[in-house]
Amino acid sequence: MSMPFYVAPEQWMKDKADFARKGIARGRALAALMYEDGILICAENSSATLRKISEIYDRIAFAGAGKYNEYDRLRIAGVRHADLKGYAFSREDVDAQSLANAYAQMLGDVFTHEAKPMEVEILVAEVGDEPSDDRLFHILYDGTVVDEHGFTVLGGEADTISARLKESYTAGRSLVEAVRTAVAALAGPERTLEPKDLEVAVLSRRNGRRAFRRLTDEELAEALRGGEVEATGRPGVPPAEATAPEAGPAGEEPGGEGTGAEGTEG
Amino acid sequence: MTLPIFRADDDPGPSFLEVLRRTGLEPNWGELPRDLAPHEVTHGTTVVALKFADGVVMAGDRRATSGNLISHRTMEKVFPADRHSGVAIAGAAGPAIEMVKLFQLQLEHYEKVEGNELSIEGKANQLAQMVRGHLPAALQGFVVVPLFAGYDLRRGTGRLFEYDVTGGRYEESEFAATGSGSLHAGTVIKMSYRPDLGRDEAVDLAISALFHAADEDAATGGPDLVRGIYPVVATITAEGFRRLPDSEVGDRFRALVERMSQPGSTTTTGTTPTMPGGSPR
């Protein structure tokens, strides 16, 4: 009969944390910045299909760094969580904070109880009606939640990139300036990043009900040249038209108050 | 609320209805009581949809009835399903509204989970499954019959689907109507329909169809010029789902009434019926 070796809890936790950090450090970084109309999320990602940044709900976005299959699972769980909550209560009741807490609980549980911690760091971003209502929740592999202000960086070399952003970031910038700031920080002094190496999306409070919007490669190239980029509406659809349909008959959104108000009796 | 995490071999996939089923939040229409009196169930009535050159027009009156009573004057029966499609409903109002809400959520949920929108066929089939799933309640008298229309971005054309109570899905190439006044509304559209109708002509035709349906069917509401309540009219084109402002619909109704009041108008409204075998002159 063999006896298991005794490992001190401190050592056990430290080993797990080191393991998770190593996994995360292998992935490329992403940065999220608050700008005048909301939140910009900018990731180094050469794949056009395997996304790091996604829409969770009307005003909430998700971004993950580290192991793709692990954060993608968290992303889908987040979409389900938000849609269930919006269905059971109302669309207004879905907020980033409760989602961030749910993620934190889950990551904390996995870190403590499972043999392998998740090698991910995630971001839950929410755009509010006013810049002061914008939220960035940065959640670490062990369930630690950090409520960030201004900007945050996830993934490999996060500290270096953070230091660069600390120098260059100022609040209340335009979208184009924010994109240029984020891309310069991700690239560093020695590299230049092309639109095809990047995945960029915004949560804009000027975007109607669904604030999430990806920037196309063309828009990104234009922004990096310093040109004008609106990023409202949908790619390929003029802004005015794109926001209107979501408003729907009862002046509101599909599936929410609008359909429900007249609905129960109607 | 905890995070809904599922094992990889037990994942509900991109279906929101399946997630609802797993979490026990799915509405259970099978438990509805049988044999409710007509005045105990609220019904929505007439909706129409017709294709035109750039897409589809959908329209629905605003009346809801419970038996012989008008229960609501401002009910909405035409909704956006997503950016490029719309759904219109007739039948038992409670389940119908819930079905629309779930359908909207289902489309958006799929888009977010998968990263791509469903094809328009896929959307039409989803709605068919939902209508089919509602059959037990329909057999107890809570019938829901929707219309689904959208702009097919892949083919560059409007598409229109009609359903029956068993979930049968029928694509229509010209127009469709459902609800109590659908017979009259459909006939009015049929008499003037052309595939190359412009946007304004198509909107006027839909408005005229609802006017005549209201003229013949007590459960269909006409334009309420006193309260300023007009049918909901929406266009679905490459630009997406757009509901017409009430001011435009009101103006078009007033123009219609104006035309019909002219001497020599073809409408029967307000004129003395002509008796077979010669009217008194």
Image (cartoon, rainbow, N blue to C red):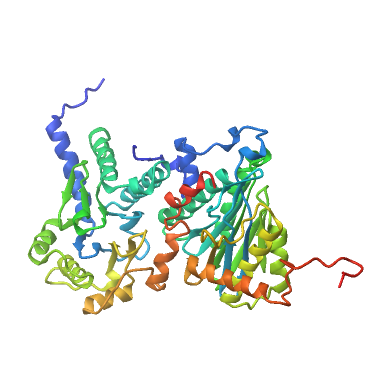
Residue at screen point 69% across, 58% down: B182
Residue B173 in view in this figure: no
Q: Position of residue A235 (x, y in %)?
A: 38, 71
Q: Position of residue A124 (x, y in %)?
A: 26, 51
Is A218 rendered above or below residue A169?
below
Towards the viewer: B142 or A172: B142
Q: Is residue B135 left or right of residue A49?
A: right
Q: Which quadrant of the structure image shows residue B181?
A: bottom right
Residue at screen point 28% across, 48% down: A96
Is A49 rendered above or below residue A228?
above
Residue found at the very far right of the displayed protein: B277
Residue at screen point 32% across, 73% down: A217
Is A164 rendered above or below residue B32?
below
Residue found at the very far top of the displayed protein: A1
The C terminus of chain B - image quarter: bottom right
Towards the viewer: A4 or B275: B275
Q: Position of residue A44 (x, y in %)?
A: 25, 64
Towards the viewer: A135 or B222: B222
Residue found at the very far front of the displayed protein: B281
Residue B164 in view in this figure: yes
Q: Position of residue B96 (x, y in %)?
A: 57, 47
The N terminus of chain B - image quarter: top left
Q: Which quadrant of the structure image shows residue B138?
A: top right
